[in-house]
Amino acid sequence: MAKKEEKDCFIIMPIADTDGYPKGHFGHVYEDIIQPSCELAGFKAVRADEVKETNLIHLDILKKLIAAPIAICDLSSRNPNVLFELGIRQAFDKPVVLIQEKDTPKIFDITPLRYLEYSQDMKYHEVLSVQKKLKASIEATAAAEGDNTNINSIVKLLALNSPAQIPDLENGKESLALEVMQAELRNMRHIMEASLSDGQRGKRRDSITAIEYERISNTLEKLVSAKRIPFEEKIDRCRRLMNETEELMHSCRNEEEHMHFRRLMERISNVEREIIA
């Protein structure tokens, strides 16, 4: 009997050694957790090493990033290249499974999404357990493609009209369309890098706003998980966070920032209601 052909699972993750992690850590995550989980689910893991080596999105890698039927993204270390590739994948509303190491700080704009955690210790029984859970997540995410209730779709989460699409050029010149996209993405990367550079030279207002958003969001998460804080103090802290968020929302300079803080206010309100209930 012929062997069933495996479909690609595109892996978005840090490749090189990263500060704060043991040497070879992400190599072990890939070899011990991700690859076996993909095989168990009937997929072939494909990692974007070429992208990491050039620091640019190579045309073939860009195509695989968009076209792969499923992807896994490791959010650990909050690597900018990883987040950039995740953004591209999500813009096209393609299925993606999110994983991260335990105790990784949450990223404010993807907090509502579901993700799987693994332990840095990488103990044998823990690795086997995570392999099974990741296999199940891969299968469930692949099966949920096109489902309007799919929680890991930013396009559906934000109720956007439609995902991004590769331009439809005459005579099926897909490679040319991808080259155009590649150039646009390269320009986006330059803009991002320039913005970060400007932020390092001076305290830009939008950078401060992002930091404040994340501070409040993380404080709220800690408040939710706190077990020993008295009821009255939890309510008081919620209301203080609400006041701070409202002040920041009114000082926003654009609609996008205003929308983020408005959603944060809704989260705080929901937490307060749960505490009272």
Image: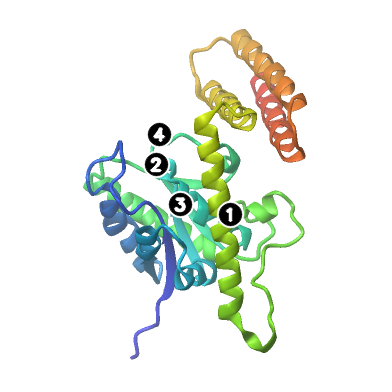
Judged from the image, the secondary structure of the residue bearing numbered disc 3 is helix
For mark 2, what is the residue? Answer: 77
Q: Which mark is residue 188?
A: 1
Q: Name the front one of labels 2 and 1.
A: 1
Question: Residue 131 at what x, y percent from top left?
Answer: 34, 55
Q: Provide residue 88's location: percent of width, then percent of height.
A: 56, 59
Mark 4 closeness class: few <14, some 14–19, many ≥20 residues within 10 Å: few
The residue depicted at 69 percent of the width and 15 percent of the height is 239
Name the residue beneath numbered marker 3: 82
Cα separation, mark 2 vs mark 4, equals 11 Å
Q: Which amino acid type corresponds to the residue marked 4 in the rendered image?
A: Asp
Is disc 1 placed on a helix, strand or loop?
A: helix
- Report the Cα–Cα distance between label 4 and label 3: 18 Å
Is label 2 or label 4 in front? 2
Based on the displayed image, in which of its 4 quarters is residue 265 positioned? top right
Rendered position, 57 above or below 102: below
Relative to 107, say whether 45 is above or below. Answer: below
User: For the residue marked with disc 2, what is the amino acid?
Assistant: Ser
The residue shown at (53%, 53%) is 189
Q: Answer with mark 3 or mark 1, whichever residue precedes in sequence.
A: 3
Q: CA distance from mark 3 to mark 2?
A: 9 Å
Residue 214, x across and y down, in percent: 56, 30
Q: Nearer the viewer, residue 173 or 78?
A: 173
